[in-house]
Image: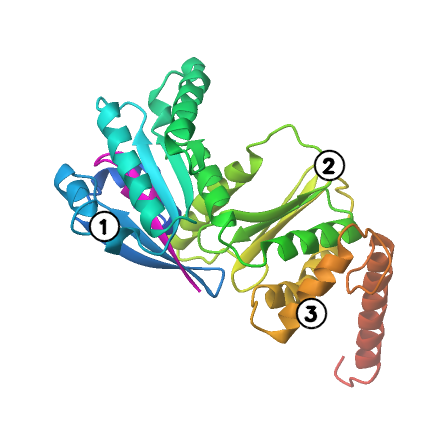
Amino acid sequence: MKKKVLLMGKSGSGKTSMRSIIFANYIARDTRRLGATIDVEHSHVRFLGNLVLNLWDCGGQESFMEQYFASQKDNIFRNVEVLIYVFDVESRELDKDMHYYQSCLEAILQNSPDAKIFCLVHKMDLVAEEQRDIIFKEREEDLKRLSKPLECTAFRTSIWDETLYRAWSSIVYQLIPNVKALEHSLYYFANVVDADEVLLFERATFLVISHCQRKNHRDSHRFEKVSNIIKQFKLSCSKLGAKFSSMEVRNSIFAAFIDTFTSNTYVMVIMSDPSIPSEATLINIRNARKYFEELENPNSMNATNAIHSAHAARGMANGGPSHYYSHHQQHQQLQQQFLQQQQQQQYHNANNPYH
């Protein structure tokens, strides 16, 4: 399943830098060596197995922009699923930026009227912190007004903080098939294992693609912060020749588990009861893997059954058939496993003449 994504904006607005950070594992300081995009750069990003983002990074020099709206209009703007237009917040040619943006909207209306529109007000780190909310609100209101009759969603972004991950997670979320079934399944999973929160990350980009929250949390930017931190840690592991697969963080307040989940995702499970044995949570993650693998393949019969089950399970905290274990069941199971191992070892010792 291919989905065409147009990435547009004036030259120097930061399009290629953000694309390189999200999809090519760059870190912010390394983007300084990237050159300007010439004409259109095409890339195919495999995302969640059968979802492929056909990303068109369009150079923003004036000569190219004029061609897009003249000789290349049908080719550029046909069959677009998402338009992402990037504005440099400190641009000295805001009127020209808005003119090009409106030209994009006219071309989208003619060729892809159902496309989703996103505007990124970028390089917000260059604005004084106390002015950021005011400036962004003004730009957002202008963009929504200029976008009519289309609707646009605006984000403020910077490559130097978590806002970039927040914006791209929200954009990609709207492209994922079966995303509602994923959410329903996470809700059921979180309730059965009594987790405070469960997050699902796309494996390559570490963007949050789905989550379930059962307890309020004061930090609304925590997902993007976690994405940023874990991705940087994963890149550090790669540079050392090590492979990142899982992590456990535990203190007196909470326990968090990050583990490989399906072939396309990582999962993060947060518990407010740090006394829960690690093995108990890891058993539940392992038992849930096959079910979520099926959800990611919308063409299989098993996935259809899984989706129906996910809808039926929504809102159920207990009861019904489940392969997950409550904490009491987990404790009993772990005790049984330990006793079995002890019995096997005793039998081995008793029958081993060399012991």
Give the alpha-carbon distance from disc 1 to disc 2, as whole Å. 48 Å
Residue 242: percent from left, percent from top: 44, 57
Quadrant of the snapshot with the C terminus: bottom right
Location of residue 168 with respect to 140 vertically, above or below: below
* Among the two numbered marks 1 and 3 on one chain, the one whose residue lies closer to the N terminus: 1
Figure coloring: rainbow
Of discs 1 and 3, which sits in the foreground?
Answer: 1
* Among the two numbered marks 3 and 2 on one chain, the one whose residue lies closer to the N terminus: 2
Which amino acid type is marked by label 1? Lys
Q: Mark 1 Cα within 10 Å, few/some/many (few <14, many 20+)?
A: some
Task: Please report the residue visible at 77 percent of the width from the left and 52 percent of the height from the top.
Answer: 193
Q: Quadrant of residue 106?
A: top left
Is 262 a magenta residue?
Answer: no
In the image, taking residue 131 as reference, residue 104 lies left or right, namely left
Element carrying mark 2: loop
Give the alpha-carbon distance from disc 1 to disc 3, as whole Å. 43 Å
In the orientation shown, which residue stands out farthest toward the left? Answer: 63
In front: 257, or 166?
Answer: 166
Residue under label 1: 73
Location of residue 136 with respect to 285 vertically, above or below: above
Which range of residues does the magenta coloring cover? 1-19
Which amino acid type is marked by label 3? Asn
Residue under label 3: 305
